[in-house]
Amino acid sequence: MTRHRARGRLPVVLALPAFIGLAFLLVPLAGLLIRAPWGSMSGRLFSAEVGQALRLSLICASLATVLCLLLGIPLAWLLARSGLPGRGFLRALVTVPLVLPPVVGGVALLLVLGRRGLVGQHLDAWFGISLPFTTAGVVVAEAFVAMPFLVISVEGALRAADPRFEEAAATLGASRWLTFRRVTLPSVLPGVVAGGVLCWARALGEFGATITFAGNFPGETTTMPLAVYLALETDPDAAIVLSIVLLLVSVGVLAGLRDRWISGPT
């Protein structure tokens, strides 16, 4: 009873800034909904420009997530289970895109994968592949900023998994690859799914690295965030509609992951 009374107390000195902080976060979102052109919403949602940007965003975000899964799961395993020295430093490097301004990430991608970049010049000369200002460049930019979300989630799941099942599989003669596929991966599947969804949502909302590395070409590199930026200068109502679509996607992602990322102890 004492514990419940203690938890129920709400000091004014904490409650006031708490509610101000809550309003600071929620009022702009409410303003977006209040100012939305609900009367013309359906027409704008089904316009060719919105459909084109939404389709491109969904395709690029999905491809970027696949790329992150193929590269991020082995990377997470390396950080969580291998005896490689300097794993702490590697983990710090992996999380750099989380705090790095996306525009800086786009510049870094240009310097490495551009036609005159450290790697891009060889891709262009040997294979005729040029990534900047293409749809493939959008996928690369989104994967660059989104992969840390997947790696962190999967690494955490790997560290929390019971290694005795893997040891038992090894004693039964299973190879490390078979153990990973049949034992390790199924045991961390919730972490993979959660990381994949967060990765997809982050890729869907990427702006800075995309516009810097892939440019803004309608139908080829203009994703939803870029379309919002363009529409804000010429058609604010269209920008609001596009923003609401992205807001609903974000809320849907958080709602789907509420048990893992939102719910706290009761």
Image (spheres, rainbow, N blue to C red):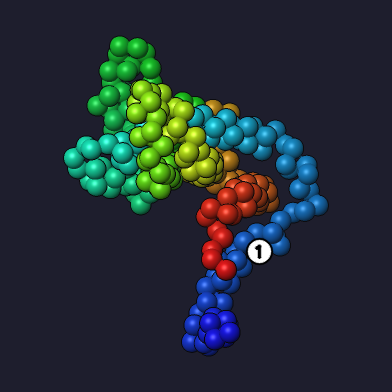
Q: Residue furthest left?
A: 85
**Which quadrant would the N terminus be assigned to in this image?**
bottom right
Under mark 1, the amino acid is Ala
Q: Residue furthest right?
A: 39
At 63% from the left and 36% from the top, the residue drawn is: 54
**Which quadrant would the C terminus be assigned to in this image?**
bottom right
Find residue 29 and report its horizontal and vertical position in percent. Answer: 62, 61
Q: Nearer the viewer, residue 132 or 256?
A: 256
Q: Is residue 218 visible?
A: no
Q: Nearer the viewer, residue 193 or 202?
A: 193
Disc 1 target residue: 30
Q: Quadrant of residue 158?
A: top left
On screen, residue 246 above or below 46 = below
Find residue 199 and report its horizontal and vertical position in percent. Answer: 49, 41
At 23% from the left and 38% from the top, the residue drawn is: 83
Find residue 195 and report its horizontal and vertical position in percent. Answer: 48, 43
Mark 1 crowd level (few <14, some 14–19, many ≥20, 10 Å Cα): few
Find residue 53 and report its horizontal and vertical position in percent. Answer: 61, 35
Task: Check disc 1 and report its element: helix, strand or loop.
Answer: helix
At 50% from the left and 79% from the top, the residue drawn is: 17
Q: Nearer the viewer, residue 146 or 237?
A: 146
Q: Quadrant of residue 117?
A: top left
Q: How many marks?
A: 1
At 24% from the left and 26% from the top, the residue drawn is: 118
Q: Residue furthest front?
A: 172
Q: Is residue 178 visible?
A: yes
